[in-house]
Amino acid sequence: MSNLTYKPTQVLTATMLCVPFLRFNDPNRLQMASNHLRQSLPLINAEIPRIRTGFENVIVKKAESFYIETNTFEKIDEFIVKTDEGLKFNAMFLKYDEKLKVAYNPYHICFVRDIVSGGWCPELKLGVNALVGYMSYYGFNYQDAVVISESFAKRLKHIERKVFVIRLPANSQLKHISSNDNTISLIPIPGKTYNTLISYEYIEAGVLQRKQINVDNLLVVDVRVKALPNYRLPASVAEFIKKAKKPFKLAKLETEPTQKYPIVIQIIGYVTREATIGDKLTNRHGNKGVIGLIVPDEEMPKTKDGKILDILFSPLSVPSRMNLGQLMENLLAKIVVKVEQQVLDLLDRNMRDKAQKMLLDFLKRVEKRSSFHHLIDNVLTKRWDLLEYNLTKYGLSIIQPPFSELNAEEIKQLAKDYNVKETDYVRVDNYDVSINVGYQTILKLEHLASSKVTGAGLTNNEYTNPQRIGEMETWNIIAHDYDEIKRLFRRSYEFEKLSYYSDKFGFDSYIFKPDVNNVYQVYKKVLFNE
């Protein structure tokens, strides 16, 4: 063991290596942060974090799911590609760069200039950089909830793959559906966007049954149809398959046809979704929270210089969890943003020498590694054009390696030297309140309200596995806006029953005016028919 060379980072997982200031976080919360990084969704407008650990580049080159070095790249279908190493599955978003000979996922990776080699280097994009404030906001961010601005909700747009498997009974008859560009068909056409995927009817026990699957702007990329051998397809299905421009693939599906359901249709596509109430967000330190309120930008707290806060965390969430690394990231990233603005301002005024000196002096102060100081003195000054390219295109981002980062006192001294305050005054309802304000990388997790709150659970819907409506969900329906609930429940025809109660007992008025006595009277009518 005396001849064994090891580093402290060897005991950390790949996702833990992406957490800055990890040694200042509680171990249990650090483990949760590591799990959250694994659950993060690919954002369309993802950004390079202001504070990196330096291991993001190493992880990218080991992650074959969104980075493959290959000389050949052939797309077999929407989800399978052929590379030098053979077939790669789940490759829906992969793009190929002919010059770099790399297949990569643009939602996870961007290419920056490598200062040492002069070439290109892949960099991992994690979430978006947000202006964060720690303050209570009328109880909407109490405990595990957060409040975000309307513009920030739009920045948190992600892309999501959806697979629908529809089993048609033997006597089914398909009905025409319309795409968003008013193209009429019986089965969704690849390349078109739909709000209604399929509509059909059949007779069961002498009763006509109607079924319909509704989605939110699903872009269909592949449709597959399979029937039992020698089974005579309904005229509507056979006619559509015959006229289809793209032949359907009769490959092995996730669900095979049976005697009861002789026809199986599999529809694959993806949707883009902005953040909405009920979605879960987190920073890289395990400070997670469900969105409790989305505030219009004009009502969101602003700093004195007019900057709108993107997200509000509860200040009580820090001491109870002891993940102090987020406060250090908050302040150091705030300093980074100010230095970036000053350097870009000097470049706009054609003062390149002064901008170069300011940036290199700052990098020397925030970087402890002696090897990096040697790099600054001998390489960066000669390849300033590459550094300037990264700065103007992706913004300033610095590295704080695990166990070699700045400590709290060094960050505070740095803030004092660059005239950056840890707290700022923000205006809320014509009052100025002093709170902790800074920048952090915010991730959007795969726990989404749209996938959990639906009416389908009441009807035992076979296409989804949603959360059922219980007592707590019912009270939430009463507390929230009726139009928002209608949007969440429109995927299921069970909502028609809710509308029936609404029309019969005047449920609408109690949604907008949730008086306790009125709610009790409604419950008596609905539940006990009194």
Image (tube, helix red, strand yellow):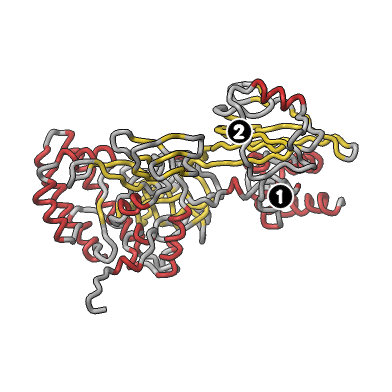
Residue drawn at the location 40% of the way across and 70% of the way down: 27
Q: Which residue is mark 2?
A: 249
Most distant residue in the front direction: 230
**Is residue 59 or residue 392 the one in the foreground?**
59
Taking 1 as reference, is 491 left or right? right
Q: CA distance from mark 1 to mark 2?
A: 31 Å
Quarter of the image with the N terminus is: bottom left
**Is residue 94 or residue 323 the one in the foreground?**
94
User: Three-letter amino acid code at disc 2?
Assistant: Lys
Residue drawn at the location 40% of the way across and 49% of the way down: 64
Q: Which residue is mark 1?
A: 457
Q: Which mark is residue 360?
A: none
Taking 75 as reference, is 123 left or right? left
User: Three-letter amino acid code at disc 1?
Assistant: Gly
Mark 1 Cα shell of 10 Å, populated few (<14), some (14-19), many (≥20): some
Q: Is residue 421 above or below residue 354?
A: below
Residue 450 visible? The answer is yes
Query: Could you tell me residue 346's position as x and y percent?
Result: 16, 38
Mark 2 Cα shell of 10 Å, populated few (<14), some (14-19), many (≥20): few
Residue drawn at the location 74% of the way across and 54% of the way down: 517
Query: Could you tell me residue 438's position as x and y percent?
Result: 33, 53
**Is residue 1 or residue 55 the one in the foreground?**
1
For the residues carrying marks 1 and 2, which lies nearer the camera in this image? 2
